[in-house]
Amino acid sequence: MARVVIIGGGPGGYEAASAAAQLGAEVTVVDSGGIGGSAVLTDAVPSKTLIATAEVMTEVEEAGELGVRVVGDGTGDAADPASSVRVDLSVVNQRVKALAAAQGAGIERRLDRDKVRMVQGRGRLDGPETVVVGQERLDADVVLIATGARPRILPGSEPDGERILTWEQVYELDQLPERLIVVGSGVTGAEFASAYNALGSDVVLVSSRDRVLPGEDADAAAVLEDVFERRGLTVLGKSRAESVKRHGDGVVVTLTDGRTVEGSHALLAVGSLPNTDDMGLAESGVSLTDGGFVQVDRVSRTTARGVYAAGDCTGVLMLASVAAMQGRIAMAHALGDAVAPLNQSTVSANVFTAPEIATVGVTQAAVDAGDTTAIEVKVPLADNARAKMQGVRDGFVKLFCLPNTGIIVGGVVVAPRASELIHPISLAVGARLTVDHIAQSFTVYPSITGSIAEAARRLHLR
């Protein structure tokens, strides 16, 4: 029976553990931060739970167009639904933490049913075949490193958990920030800026680039910026933060050009650092990048025989879904099961702003740069009957296909619940379906998915 030791209990670790147990291995998971990892306990699950409340606030705010009037305790204006609806952040965050804990406990029960041994503590390698946890030495035929990543901190801007916060600390707040300064306009920064704006905070988003979401589709980012402006969210473009300091009951963010921005709270969202320090990795033959990420191939192998890695510690598309897939692939490869190497071109991703931005496959940037040859079409949601009924004006569906063959190679959806709507496009990309396959498939009328079929029809014979 193969002995598998997994260091880290996040999605890469617990999914790998279940896969290895199913394949008959003797599995041990070593974890110091709680089963579920940051994705379940402090990152993806908590943030999306918070965003779920923000989504309700957005829907209420925009319900007036649909003829809905919300009159709360009599203090609000019946013509302005938002004025009569308030968020109790302490209740919201209690729910956030309770759901995260319940999800983590559920995963732990699942591993227990799979007869996976769980060891509390910080694991490190002593050679490629031994994991050391405190005084215990665990011999292994296969080792998986799945230690995740942590928030990057600006030098001289140490979080205090009260006014200067990382995204792992915001759930301890019991009152809504009066004026929140979000430093960083990537996915995490944009999501929290969108959420707190919907919850009722005055939000300033500090972006070092000329637009928000510099790594996402430019058309999608433009839609989001328009929405931000309409909802009163301030975006400071081309404004790099130099430091964040506590100032009395508030904070001061100093920009590199000398300007300052004052607020009640600041949220740092300036990237992540891998949790690979002091683990004996290099000494055991595991190669790291200059940034400390574990180097892996498409089946999650490191440069040390028998040692694999998965998740954010590898720096490969830092998504929980990718971490889980890397972990499962690693175990399949190590234990002799059929394995399909990770194909990044079929990975779907989502930005949980309002509206959401979902993507898969080929990007507009790659097409514009000439890195790939594809043709595209964009269908605005403003033309969609169901969107009109729901009062949705912002967003679009974009499809990319290969010329001549019409094979779909990518797509972008900007819409409410885009995370759900991207799935048929992901299936098309993964199965190499053509635009005619999509165009000739029935969609419900009226539906937002009808715009996906419409985009496919527009690409016919192009």
Image: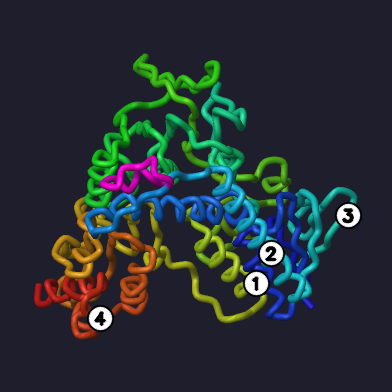
Q: Is residue 162 above or below residue 405?
A: above
Q: Are marks 1 and 2 in contact (CB under 8 Å)?
A: yes
- The residue that mark 2 highlights is 306
Q: Tell me the CA gap for discs 1 and 2.
A: 7 Å
Q: Earlier in the sequence, mark 2 or mark 4?
A: 2
Give residue 99's position: percent from left, percent from top.
61, 58
- The residue that mark 1 highlights is 334
| Residue type (three-letter) at the residue carrying disc 4 | Val
Q: Quarter-wise, where is residue 242 in the image?
A: top left
Q: Earlier in the sequence, mark 2 or mark 3?
A: 3
Residue drawn where x is 52% and y is 44% of the image = 88
Q: Is residue 203 above or below residue 37?
A: above
Callout 3 environment at 10 Å: few (<14), some (14 to 19), or many (20+)?
A: few
What label does residue 136 carry, if any?
3
Start-end of magenta stretch: 73-85
Residue 15 in view in this figure: yes
| Residue type (three-letter) at the residue carrying disc 3 | Glu
What label does residue 166 carry, if any?
none
Callout 1 environment at 10 Å: few (<14), some (14 to 19), or many (20+)?
A: many
Q: Earlier in the sequence, mark 3 or mark 1?
A: 3
